[in-house]
Amino acid sequence: MPGLGTSFGRGGATNFLQDLANSDCIVIEGSNMAECHPVGFQWVSEAKARGAKVVHIDPRFTRTSAIADLHVPLRAGSDIAFLGGLIKYVLDNDKYFPEYVVAYTNAAAILREDFRDTEDLDGLFSGYDPEHKHYDESTWEYEGDATPAAAGQRGPDEPGGKPARDAREGKQAGEHGPDVHEAAQHEAAGSGGPTVRVKPKRDETLQHPRCVFQVLKRHYARYTPEMVAQICGIDPQAFLQVAEWITANSGRDRTTAFVYSVGWTQHSVGAQYIRTASILQALLGNMGRPGGGIMALRGHASIQGSTDIPTLFNLLPGYLVMPHAQQHMSLEEYCAQSKNTAGFWGNMPSYMVSLLKAYFGDAATPENDFCFDHLPRLTGDHSSYQSVAQMIEGNVPGYFLVGENPVIGHANGRMQRFGLANLEWLVVRDLQMIESATFWKDAPEIETGELVTDQIATEVFFLPAASHVEKAGTFTQTQRLLQWRHKAVEPPGDARSDLWFYFHLGRLLKQRLANSTDPRDRPILDLAWDYPTEGETADPSPEAVLREINGVGPDGKALGAYTELKDDGSTSCGCWIYCGVYADEVNQSARRKPGRDQNAVAPEWGWAWPANRRILYNRASADPDGKPWSDRKKYVYWDDDAGTWTGDDVPDFEPEKRPDYRPPEGATAQAAIAGTDPFIMQSDGKAWLYAPAGLADGPMPTHYEPAESPMSNPLYGQQANPGREELPAAYNRGNPVASEVFPYVFTTYRLTEHHTAGGMSRTLPYLAELQPEFFVEVSPELAAERGLENGGWATVVTSRSAVEAKVLVTERIRPLRLDGRVIHQIGVPYHWGGTGISTGDSGNDLTGVVMDPNVHIQESKAATCDIRPGRRPRGPELVGFLEEYRRRAGVPSGTVPVGGRAPLEEDS
């Protein structure tokens, strides 16, 4: 989550769901919270009952919109223009919180003279390399700062820096394009913001022409209400109403909260959507305060946990970056960037060494670099879609699918099926025999002839999994809260938990390699794998695993906080941000003290990372002197008599650091953070209105059109995100901009009655009955224009595929007028596939793979299509039907050889 991580220092929701009840205004954008997060939505309803204004900004009118005081329909993919307009309104009308902005943000920081903005370069920032579609960030730096970098990066003169890598690779200085390091760095700001070496020159009058505040004003000067209306298709009066509500409900005595979900993240500029909201909330003084913040709604029960202890290719637990080939040849090189830096990221060696001790136990010693060489190294972009492209080319022999159904749930289902068809083996662990396990016999491409069952060599192993009620362990959910779940029943038959599967897989591998002398087997043999087991099926103890994640000290006792971690090998910790979840040898995540027996923050219900803090950056809830901004919003404050920070929550600050503390010369890590700097994971202690490092596509959010758009960019000559990632191939053709063949916008979404790719819901009769058929939503105007009938069939077409669906004609999704032109939008739920009780075509077959360069997430919330009445062609006729559409649109051929093995093409 680099949008939040780069802005504030940590990649997680900044507040907790119950705190929404304390908001005076709530803006929900990029989320249909009432339907997709209905339990958490109760706190929005509570806030409204207390008098808060609720705004819902979304292309569709939904149940969330029905509860809101105001629904603002906008064009999918235009959110930065809308939010940028709000920023302009705040700055032009002096609606920002001046004391907060000067003290707690980098508004006063002065930038280098050679920085150039999009306003100077027609949509590009300085440092852009058009050949590699990559930015050199050096001109984005603060004045006087020579080496800003994302966590884990290296400056040019440090161990592991560019010249050192080039020398190893036999390159001359400057003879390189973007390497693996640049390809995978930007998620590293998840917990510990990007590193900046020295604190910048500041002008606290905010008048210097190169201070961030003035640069920000210039950057958003053209985002007028009229321009916002032209880009977003919204009523200027509705825009002004939102602007007035959020500014009237922000300041010393009032706070506004923003809420988002995948409606923001699944864009080619998704990280920058979140950055724009972060800028707005920092200007308004809403961060670190009750009823404020940014609530990042996660899409599953433990998606937050799956990034904290990651299933991501480029991160280690706690958002430590994965080592890079040719760059991190030693632990010293890996930790070099944190050396002598300010903020808690300055303790990176302690976090990393403790992780290595958790991995390798007694085998990790100072003499062998704590087994640092055992860790794999990144050699390129190994994200999900890049991996599928490599599968298609035959470069990936095996694949594990664990609780994932990519042929339905991921973008471009046809591409996913081609990938699976070109493996040697596939392991599927799921509750049901999902489409990703049976693709070899029932994929749509079997019918079209693009795949032939007898020619698919992939050997599929289906291993039934235990459901959430059939295993014990933790979920880490939306608000960073670890909650223990107890096993209710035993899993049926051969079904087993994921913990059982991975533990016994590791145990068997260690047994088979026990006599090996091959150095490549040493990492597995050295793994600490001595978890106690229980029961007839020898399940490993989840409590023991959680305790290992928490970490232990030299006395063998559970640690109480990540501040106790050491870099000498005397402590071990499986995830430094989770240190404290087993403090005092108590499973803190299993606590369930009733709300009536504790304060409203409920600190004894579960455990939140870090250190059980429920509102992050809560030092900002007090003024620079440590006094509450107001009695009404009193939260954490300095108690001078006791000499400590106190309040309803655990202070997100060193508890005894006085407000008047100033770092001595040469101070590092947390000692370099002043008593007035609330954002303790940032190396300058400030919230970043401007990001001098850490993002691949610019230091400030800029409106770019989606890769597939019905219009040219009204703001700049640069049409789309210049850093976007694309996979040019026959199976992933894109629709041209402003295409008459594909004139309509579509956006995918979820329904309450179905769960993502449908494996947990389409097989259940009650849920299948509630939503029995794949459908698409269209407006009455579009239905009339295209001859669509409510309840009849329609075919939706893109350059990737065509799907058929029942038509729902509804005023919930209405046409928008943009600069005199009407834009129609279509809503496409994506839950359906070919198996289960409720079946149908997959909406994600329509979407292409174009990705945000920071997080490699696909743009599936804004694309273009055609829609026509009737059912789609069948069999080989569908291939010809699509090829004719491509020909008419001027798109290259999308046909592939039988088996789907089409290569990636040179990007034109």
Image: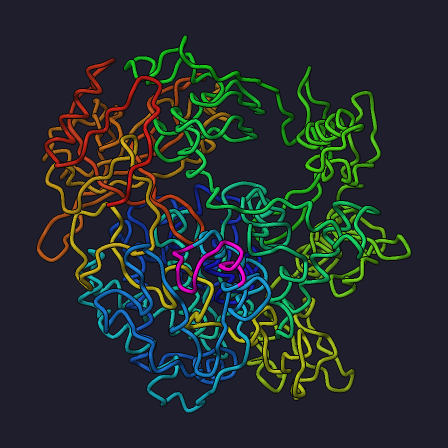
Q: Is residue 174 magenta?
A: yes
Which residue is nearer to you in this view: 379 or 818? 379
Instruction: Tell me where residue 674 sits by quadrant.
Output: bottom right
Q: Total marks drawn?
A: 0
Residue at 10%, 32% in the rendered image:
888
Q: Is residue 128 left or right of residue 284?
A: left
The residues colored magenta run 164-178
Q: From this viewpoint, is residue 592 visible?
A: no
Q: Answer above or below: position of 128 versus 907.
A: below
Which residue is nearer to you in this view: 261 or 555? 555
Principal secondary structure, stretch drawn in magenta? loop
Which residue is nearer to you in this view: 494 or 369? 369
Q: Position of residue 76 (x, y in %)?
A: 28, 49
Which residue is nearer to you in this view: 274 or 316? 316
Residue at 65%, 61% in the rendered image:
601
Q: From this viewpoint, is residue 349 visible?
A: yes
Q: Answer above or below: position of 551 versus 340.
A: above
Q: Position of residue 149 (x, y in %)?
A: 50, 67
Where does the C terminus fall, quadrant-wise?
A: top left
Q: Is residue 614 magenta?
A: no
Q: Return the residue found at the far top.
A: 454
Instruction: Tell me where residue 136 sits by quadrant.
Output: bottom left
Q: Return the residue found at the far right.
A: 555
Q: Position of residue 516 (x, y in %)?
A: 76, 29
Q: Answer above or below: position of 154 versus 112.
A: above
Residue at 27%, 44% in the rendered image:
907
Q: Position of residue 409 (x, y in %)?
A: 42, 32
